[in-house]
Amino acid sequence: MILKYIEGVRDKYPKSSTFLCGYEAGCLGYSLYHELKNHNVDCKILAPTTMAITNNRRVKTDKRDAGNIARCLALKTYSEVYVPSAEDNAIKDFIRMRDDHMKMLKSTKQQILAFTLRNGFKFEEGKTYWTLKHMSWLRTLKIDGVFKETLDEYLVTYEQLLDRIERLDQRIEELALGEKYNENVKMLNCFIGIKTHTSLSFLAEIGDFNRFAKAGNFSSFLGLTTW
């Protein structure tokens, strides 16, 4: 319906019609933005907290809200929401996939520990699990038959996940060297406790840190409250 209306106006005023669409950030996400952009229609997503209030009566209707958005666009009394690029979205999905493997690894570890305790085995040769000593202990447990097969399958899964996560982490390091992220990743890595995985996650999720004037604005975006 939007595109049909726009085309109708363009047909009527072919030389003097320029369109700028906008909507408040919310449940629509970026889907409408991308659809309009794909049809060569300029679109802005407005951050609701930055929009000038022109409706003092606090009456909310679609017509009043649309009028308020139009005035904000015309007077530029708003801040635009950053729209992730295709590269940002691809990296976010890759990192999420890697993190899913970490969850699977954690679950596999819990299953192995539960299996050994359930069958009367307790590791007493150290205080830390998943060390070389602990892994050696697991592989030399005196169990036979299907019990042995079960533990072996758990250990194979554990080792496969470890290898896969190591490979995925290496790929994340390579992605962080890309022209768009490299410099900012290096700067974020200067903070204690922040490594490449966290830095790249931040950059892909946040996009443009310059849109936050102060640290407090960034905290509000994250949903954090300072005391």
Image (spheres, grey):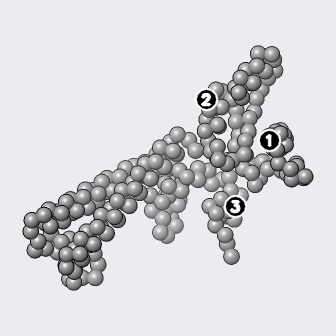
Q: Residue at x 43, y 48 (%)?
A: 94
* Residue 168 at least partly seen: yes
Residue 164's image quarter?
bottom left
Estimate how packed mark 2 is, as few (under 14), some (14 to 19) or many (20 or more) residues with alpha carbons within 10 Å: few
> In the figure, is residue 145 to the left or right of 94?
left
Residue 74 versus residue 152: which sits nearer the camera? 152
CB contact under 8 Å: marks 1 and 3: no
CB contact under 8 Å: marks 2 and 1: no
Front label number (3 vs 2): 2
Estimate how packed mark 3 is, as few (under 14), some (14 to 19) or many (20 or more) residues with alpha carbons within 10 Å: few
From the image, tell me which residue sits under label 2: 38
Q: Residue at x 38, y 61 (%)?
A: 103
From the image, tell me which residue sits under label 3: 217
Front label number (2 vs 1): 1
| Residue 80 placement (x, y as % from top left) | 71, 46
* Mark-to-mark CA distance, 2 and 1: 25 Å
